[in-house]
Amino acid sequence: DMIASADKYYDESNLMDVRILGTLGLTEQDVVAIEATDGIVKAEGGYSTEVLAFSDENEMVFNVMSAGENLNRMTIWEGCMPEKENECFMDQGFMIYKGYEIGDTITVTDEGGNKPGNLKTDTFTIVGSGTWSWYFSWNRGSASIGDGSMDAFIVVPEETFEMDYYTVIYAMVNGVEGMSTFSDTYDEAVKLVTERIEEIA
């Protein structure tokens, strides 16, 4: 039942099958090339950055992400998705844990305590909260700043980022819709397509 529920959640949120990262950045041409790869049905570029914030003098690390157009849809529990550059959608579990509410503001910094250079603003108004199927458990992963552990994610409009390149490309594999995400059949199908993407890297 747990496996079936998780798989249904992934399908309903249109969670990507492949996540491509580029240390030098990724371009729109990369998105086009990946989408043209045999076995890929959809590819979408995105932006993300790691920032710091403080609550009661405690340091927190946030993964700030751009809102996807078709892939990786958020599940909204309260409020709405952000539309303006200074609005954000917050990780619901973290929001409850820290006592944030819709309408509150949060200020983020880089490791030097300054406004992050790749964001147009450092202060956001929380307009919505919810979950993302990529973070199915409480673990939010590792971070390259702060204490090395990610505390939460926030989602902002793509226009909030001041970047000339994407930091990630998400892709959907064709023909795996009816497969269980936890099956060997699914893993083999995705691995085959992933190898084709690696060939054009």
Image (cartoon, helix red, strand yellow):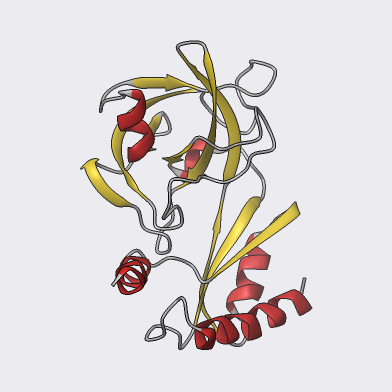
Q: Position of residue 177 (x, y in %)?
A: 39, 83
Decide if residue 69 is in sight here: yes
Q: Position of residue 176 (x, y in %)?
A: 45, 85
Residue 162 left/right relative to 84: right
Q: Determine the residue located farthest toward the top in the rendered image.
A: 57
Decide if residue 83 is in sight here: no
Residue 9 left/right relative to 191: left
What residue is drawn where x is 41% and y is 85%?
179
Q: Position of residue 140 (x, y in %)?
A: 51, 45
What residue is drawn where x is 43% and y is 42%?
157
What residue is drawn where x is 64% and y is 15%?
113
Q: Determine the residue located farthest toward the front in the rendered image.
A: 1
Q: Pick whichever, 193 or 120, lies toward us.
A: 193
Q: Pick whichever, 152 or 105, lies toward us.
A: 152
Q: Is residue 151 above or below residue 108?
A: below
Quadrant where the C terminus sits is bottom right
Q: Pick whichever, 1 or 22, lies toward us.
A: 1
Count of numbered marks: 0
Residue 101 left/right relative to 190: left
Q: Quadrant of residue 156?
A: top left
Q: Quadrant of residue 112?
A: top right
Q: Position of residue 145 (x, y in %)?
A: 68, 31
Q: Quadrant of residue 136?
A: bottom left
Q: Is residue 124 above or below residue 181?
A: above
Q: Is residue 25 above or below residue 200?
A: above
Quadrant where the N terminus sits is bottom left
Q: Determine the residue located farthest toward the left in the rendered image.
A: 78
